[in-house]
Amino acid sequence: MKQKTSSVLLILAAGCMWGCMGLLVRPLTTIGLDTMEICFLRALITFLTMLAGLLIADRSAFSIHLKDIWCFIGTGAFSVTFFNFCYFKTITLTSLSVAAVLLYMSPAFVMIMSFFLFKEKITKVKIAALFIAFTGCVLVSGIGTGGDLNAAGILTGLGAGFGYALYSIFGRYALQRGYHSMTITFYTFLFATLATVFFVDVPDIADKISAAPMTGVYGGFMILFVTLFPYLCYTKGLSGLENTTASVIASIEPVVATVLGVIIYGETPNPITFLGIVCVLGSIVILNKKERKGLVIWKEK
């Protein structure tokens, strides 16, 4: 029970830190960095920070078996990079609210893949929590206020949700092979850096940052806060929770983003937004209630 409680708190912490992404993105966009360049910086700075930290604290964390490298290519290139590419593409094809809602199809992808790959049960409680959380994300994102729905945007948006879900899947495989969350996070961002470098102009990024050094320093600090720490927390939290449960709990992210928008940027939420927040929080409570016997809908034999 203690392990489950600590895992829930770690996943909540990860979702809350991810919800602070706007505090990173807004200042960096003001100096001319686009979304893919920010994605590259997140991967590079996280990788370099972990490299320095592990060289000092625990060099044994670098040790992996070559046969397991696919797990880290999965978390880094297939999940982090693919998710970011699809998400940012969706934003160009449709509205931010539509992109956010499609991204939060990820718990559904996690539940389906975890059923087949890890024999996780599909229960009424999980389905109810997933539905309530998704509804909450729809309301918080304000999709009802408009948005250009089109086939290409929907496809890339679902791709973002799928890529987001893949971290739970590949991360679980790495944990099952005995790797520490530090090792998983380090190699995740090594491969994320290698994958994203092909989409950016590195000298141009350096010029933009050198022109606004204080923003660059702030951005570096925030990258650690909204990237390194939450991925460490989420990966560690996965060791004590089922994938579906973890992904739904992480849906706290848009709630935190909304609250920060109100507190810091003076944005005015409407009653629908508050209803969405209640839905997301309610789904987390539902998932952490002890399930009664007989609620399993489908399980792998």
Image: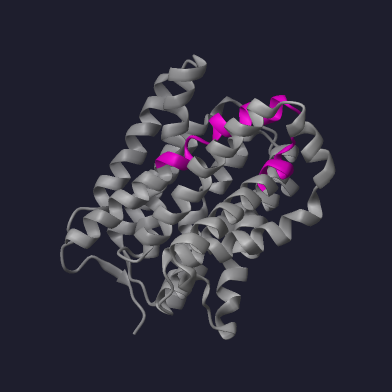
In the picture, measured across the screen, residue 88 lies left or right of residue 289, that is right
Where is residue 213 drawn, in percent x and y? 69, 28
Check the image and tell me how it is coloured.
one colour
Quadrant (top left/top right/bottom left/bottom right) for the C terminus: bottom left
Where is residue 69 drawn, in percent x and y? 59, 77
In the image shown, does 221 or 100 lie closer to the viewer? 221
In the picture, measured across the screen, residue 160 lies left or right of residue 266, that is right
In the picture, measured across the screen, residue 175 lies left or right of residue 214, that is left
Taking the image as drawn, is residue 150 in sight? no
Secondary structure mostly seen in magenta is: helix
Name above or below for residue 28 compared with residue 128. above
For image coordinates 47% across by 15% down, the residue present is: 268
Name above or below for residue 261 compared with residue 8. above
For image coordinates 43% across by 64% down, the residue present is: 181
For image coordinates 34% across by 76% down, the residue present is: 299
- Indicate the quadrant where residue 74 lies: bottom right
In the picture, measured across the screen, residue 146 lies left or right of residue 12, that is right
- Indicate the quadrant where residue 99 lies: top right
Taking the image as drawn, is residue 136 in sight? yes
For image coordinates 75% across by 48% down, the residue present is: 152
In the image shown, does 295 or 159 lie closer to the viewer? 159
What residue span does the magenta drawing correspond to? 16-39
Where is residue 250 drawn, in percent x and y? 41, 48
